[in-house]
Image: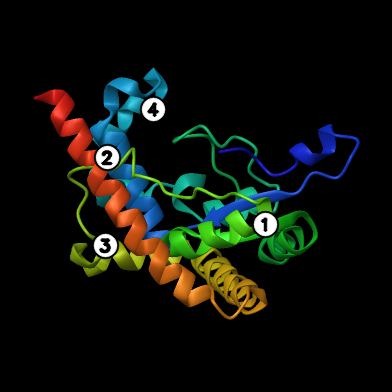
């Protein structure tokens, strides 16, 4: 939600945190969320309704081509646009992204391992109540495993750097978990259970209000 480089605006050291996402999941989420929320998009982005998924992933734009690497290496500064102009990343983009992560990031999580990331972040920041409920969920987004092989191949071919960066993020997350007390996985199981109950209770409360 913000470009890398904002730390240069502050006189003291400011750590970043981020969550990386599986490239296929990220692009599917971007496309279907935008299609489902056309009325909320700026006018220049509403043209996404004219593209099929295959047409969209084939476009030569940053959103469909190693976007996460581009942001984290500092090459992509416009993070609020679907169709901002493309451009080749530097040859050492992946190396730069990894170096920036090592030098500036207190934590790099993974969307597909959100609960693990949240537990680590809670311990780091001293947060006590970590329960959450999901918002901005695209109701009619197909599962990644149902996408045709040709579309998946296009996404993976155009996001080789992001795939490597995603693997790197997972390895960093594993290292952080090893630094956590031995009770991490017990705490994780307990948190998943209590958060499930919290979500059910919240959903029940919303249903009562509606009735």
- Look at the picture and state if 131 lies above or below 173: above
Please identify the residue farthest to the left as the structure is shown: 211
7 left or right, relative to 197: right
Question: Residue 45, located in which quarter of the rendered image?
Answer: top left
| Above or below 133: residue 205 | above
Q: Earlier in the sequence, mark 3 or mark 2?
A: 3
Residue that label 4 marks: 45
For discs 3 and 2, the disc positioned in front in the rendered view: 2
Q: CA distance from mark 2 to mark 1?
A: 27 Å
Viewer-nearest of discs 4 and 2 = 2
Quarter that holds the C terminus: top left
C-alpha separation, residue under disc 4 versus residue under disc 2: 34 Å
The quadrant of the image that shows the N terminus is top right
Q: Residue at x 59, y 74 (%)?
A: 177
Front: mark 2 or 1: 2
**Residue pointed to by mark 3:** 144
Q: Position of residue 95 (x, y in %)?
A: 72, 67
């Amino acid at each position: 939600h913000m470009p890398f480089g904002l730390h240069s605006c502050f006189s003291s050291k400011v750590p970043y945190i981020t969550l990386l996402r599986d490239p296929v999941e990220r692009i599917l989420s971007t496309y279907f969320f935008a299609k489902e929320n056309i009325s909320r998009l700026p006018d220049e982005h509403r043209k996404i309704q004219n593209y099929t998924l295959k047409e969209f992933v084939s476009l030569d734009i940053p959103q469909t081509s190693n976007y996460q690497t581009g942001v984290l290496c500092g090459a992509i500064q416009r993070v609020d646009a679907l169709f901002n102009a493309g451009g080749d990343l530097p040859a050492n983009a992946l190396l730069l992204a990894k170096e920036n992560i090592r030098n500036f990031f207190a934590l790099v999580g993974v969307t597909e391992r959100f609960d693990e990331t949240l537990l680590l972040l809670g311990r780091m920041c001293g947060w006590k109540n970590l329960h959450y409920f999901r918002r901005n969920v695209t109701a009619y987004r197909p599962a990644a495993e149902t996408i045709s092989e040709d579309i998946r191949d296009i996404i993976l071919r155009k996001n080789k750097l992001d795939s490597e960066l995603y693997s790197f993020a997972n390895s960093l997350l594993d290292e952080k978990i090893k630094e956590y007390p031995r009770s991490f996985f017990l705490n994780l199981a307990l948190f998943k259970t209590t958060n499930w109950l919290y979500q059910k209770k919240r959903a029940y409360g919303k249903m009562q209000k509606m009735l």
